[in-house]
Image (cartoon, coloured by chain):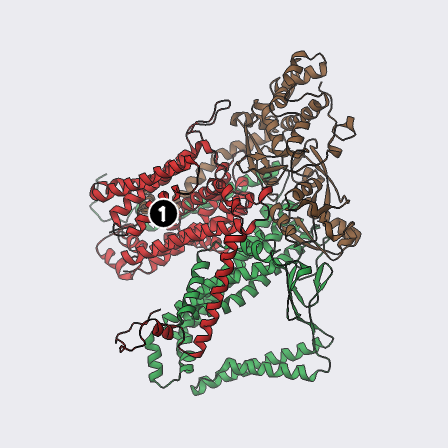
Amino acid sequence: MRKSLLFVSLLVVASMLLAACGAPAASEAPAEAAATEAAAPAPAQTVLEVTVPGYGETLKAVQERGKVVCGVNAQVPGFGFVDSAGVFSGFDVDFCRALAAGIFGDPDAVEFRALTSSERFTALQAGEIDVLSRNTTWTLTRDTELTGNFVHTMFYDGQGMMVAADSGFTTLKDLEGGTICVQTGTTTELNLADVMAAEGISYTPAVFEDSNATLAAYAEGRCDAITTDKSGLVSNRASLPDPAAHVIMDVTMSKEPLGPMVRHGDDQWFDIVQWTAFALFTAEEYGITSANVDDVKASATDPNIMRLLGTEPGMGAKLGLSEEWAYNIIKLVGNYEELYNRSLGPDTPTFIPRGFNSLYTDGGLLYAPPFR
Amino acid sequence: MQNPQTVLPPITERSGILRWLRHNLFNTWSDAILTVIAASLIYWLTKNLLTWAVTTAEWDVVVANLRLFMIGQFPLEQAGRLWVALAFLVFLTGNSLAIWDRKSYIAAFLILGLPVFLIFLPFAPQTRIWLGVMAAAGILGWGLGYTAPQSVKRSVAIGWLIALPVFILLTRGFTPAVADVPNTPITIVPTNLWGGLLLTFLLTVVANIFSFPLGLLLALGRRSELPIIRWFSVGYIELVRGVPLITILFMAQLMLPLFLPNGQDIDRVLRAMVGMTLFSAAYLAENVRGGLQAIPKGQFEAAHALGLSSAKTMYFIILPQALRLIIPILVGQFISMFKDTALVAIVGLFDLLGIARTVLSQPEFIGLHREVYAFVSLFYWGLSYVMSYISQRLETSLGLGTR
Amino acid sequence: MQHTPATKRATPFWRDERFLQLLGQALFLIAVFGFAWIIINNMRTGLQKQGMTLGFSFISGIAGFDIAELPIVYSRSSTYLQAYTVGLLNTLIVSGIGIFFSTILGVILGVARLSKNFLINRLAALYLELMRNMSLLVFLIFWYQGLFLKLPKIKEAIIWFDSVYWTNRGIGIPWGIPTASYPTFQLFLLSGIFLALIVFFSLQAYAKRTGRAPLTSLWSALAFTVVAIVGWLVLPLKPLELSIPFANGLNLSGGKIFSPEFMALTSGLVLYTAAFIGEVVRSGILAVSNGQVEAARALGLNRFQTLRLVVFPQALRVIVPPLTSQYLNLTKNSSLAVAIGYPDMFYVSNTIINQSGRAVEMIAVVMLTYLTFSLITSLFMNWYNAKIKLVER
């Protein structure tokens, strides 16, 4: 008589279902119901898909939802990770905030989806996320076959190799016969194979599913070297117990332009994400920061700045956004330099010198087209 | 393994400890050698483990991230809801203990005393207040059940029935978040912020509860006389049981969005729940089938002889017996699903294991794998152990699983 | 509708049970196929919209990545299909070795659990309790990162007897390397197997004819061993040469080197599965009632004979079905290799998905492969059950 209560409740649920069906052919009911449910929207969808090329769909969906869904990394300090307060932070993560600030005037109108490197493209393809900002390298295959479009590169990187300082290794040739830790599903994995094959160096890969495990294995001495983008190596080194005991070799194994990626088929959305990046560059170029943006806006006489900040209207409307969009980005999130310094600047444990990621005026590669 | 001793041994001077030792440990030469080996193994393991746990291990990583382990990124200002939900569960537990198992003082003491014990640990003041609330809820429930078992019986049963919906509702929240308005305690918390033990718990419970009707139907389908239904059930069950859970979870994460009409999105947590449910249903179906097979044919024949239709025979005669028979197996499946939820970490969810992997990327705690995974293992192990212990107790005291 | 005809007519078709059953099944079939069609259609249109089509032509594309553990020849310029084959073979290797050792450990545990020695008994019980309540994935990660990665680095390797190396770069043990005469030796082994088979069947025929119970397996094994030893002694050049591992710069060389990932996965699976096998063995032994043993002893069988002819065959009948399913579990669980970086089938397929974007196709292939495993297992089970039934009569 004393029955487990949980069990009783289960039994009731089950028996209700049974009673509803009754007949021996009981199991047909749920499947059928599901079928009709799914059947209804399907034909309409087919029609829609033929007539509408997808232009403007994403922005509309985002605005209806009230937030941008952004695919990020949760495991790379400096670019995307969860701090102990449980908040996503990092350079890639802040880009999503900038995007949300431009669209909604609210940097927190973002839903972050932590994605593994394996699932990121499927998540984008399936429409699960609006934009992928997860240190993703721009390659031909990804731009075509994986049905994404890369917007302007946010961070120029190159693949490097980190070894223990006391190993004395300086070139790749020194790694002959060694073991190299690498993360799976990345271009890094392919580059490593390419470069080592080209140089005729034999090695053993130790391949791991996430960047944590890869670094952990290297830290324990499982491998002689660890390879990933140099930015990643810098943050990796910073998070090792004794950073000074590790050196990043002066070898660049590949070009790694990292930038946000959107789906094929919605050019408006592509433009919005693209020009969010340009707004960040331009703001730095004109020296507009979140601190002085109000003053600059009030006193601006340069038409370039006035167009950027929306005092001379027109630009925002062309993107389908409010005229204040760039102002909001700068005010609420900052310009490129602020984004950079917040996550990768000299005051952070993951400091990376700007290098290529400086404005063209400082000899870097950041060069935004004019706002007009 | 005690040998049932029917004849009392003659009383000798060597009774007591020495005799026991000789009898159980040093019966023969080989026995003695084994004993020595086992004893030194135990000593070595215990010593090393204790030395590590007390001196070498840095438990800061667990203390600093306790909140992440428990509820993931669930916002703190809304966490009060979870405490309320938990207090509700504790209340019901106390109530049920007092009504149905009032003799098990140990269980009552453990469940009601645990919050009280935790209050004395150095938690934040707010946490302590909530722990106090929980203790009060538990004791209140127990007292209520003890004084008036008959009158509250029904409401407790209803309480358990609505416990899961209530828990999920409280976890999810009610009002959508509005920009520029600060979040209230009842603001909706999106599922991507659910994490840690909370997510593990929800995944387990939801997968098990929803797989039950599905599994039952599949089991009946497999025994159906209609060939198409039978083939379908057999096909489904064998297909799911033939592949590892991880492939099903991968399919749920990567392919489910593709199956839906374009533009429709399905939550990642929900996807994992769907995957776990579909997986669990196949195993449950086999368990139920085992129970059905154990019912003697005479039961069917007797029911038919009484003029009951097949459906009624199944519902009134066979199922109640069969299900009662397999309760221990069902509990076992519940536990194994709980252990299997850890696999959602591989597809990128922040359950207890997933959170552990994230915590290990915090710069200040890098390399503390042993501590973090030991803590997490302990949690999985402890909870499974407690569950299986309770179920064994229930089995013996209620005579479940036997007829 | 209370109208009842005076004459007894045939049941109208809408109340005919057979018709209703047919109709129900037809509806069910339509529902299932409709549902499947909708799903596949959704998927096709969804993929088409992104310019992707389903198909397996990609499988002959260049993989482009390296794999650490290679049972066959493979390089970055091999195809995806070859990469998949490497993964498949690795899965089979881990499963085979895992099954072998978990059976041994499981039997030991099962027997220990029944031991009269208090300490051994409790220790086995503790172990079973520990493992059976553990989440395998958490255990494997802990086992790999907490134990095998914490082994000393190669320069500080722990060395046993100058020949067994323990490092976190790999575990090296002495191993035989085939020499020029190895192919000849293989012929000897082959004829040994042949002879063993002859012995086996003739002894079985003898047993059937006379009703005696010779030690069939023992004699067959002996026949094989004798031929193998003779072959070893006869050949002038020894077929296998002992190779001892040594630290060679960045890596271990010589002997047989097992990677930490392989060791962690295999030993983790063995330790975990053995606990379940232990329970199976224990319940199998307990299932043979004491009366059987007493009866056998009363018939004058000695202890060994009782075990071999009475207890063992009966226990085996109880043990084999759950044991087989444990073997299958182990094989399926080996897919957790993905969490610790051993390139088994699932892991390699995962990499292929990442590099080629072919999620649907690869998941289908992986599932089909596991289904084949389980199909083979259930075929074996059916055969075994049928065989046992014969014995019962």
Q: Looking at numbered disc 1 in the image, what kind of residue is underneath it?
A: Ala
Residue drawn 46% across the image and 59% down it = C131
Is residue C136 something that shows in the picture? Answer: yes
Position in image of residue C334 (x %, y %):
55, 57
Residue at point 37% right, 49% down? B217
What tint does the image give chain B?
red
Residue nearest the observer in this picture, C269 or C141: C141
The image shows residue C254 at horizontal and vertical percentages of: 70, 67
Q: Which chain is green?
A: C
Q: Is residue A123 above or below residue C182?
A: above
- Residue bearing mark 1: A26
Image location (x, y in percent) of residue A341: 67, 31
Total marks placed: 1
Q: Bin the neighbour count of mark 1 within 10 Å (Cα to Cα): few under 14, some 14-19, many 20 and up.
A: many
Instruction: Determine whether B223 is above or below B365 in the image.
Output: below
Chain letter corresponding to the colour brown? A
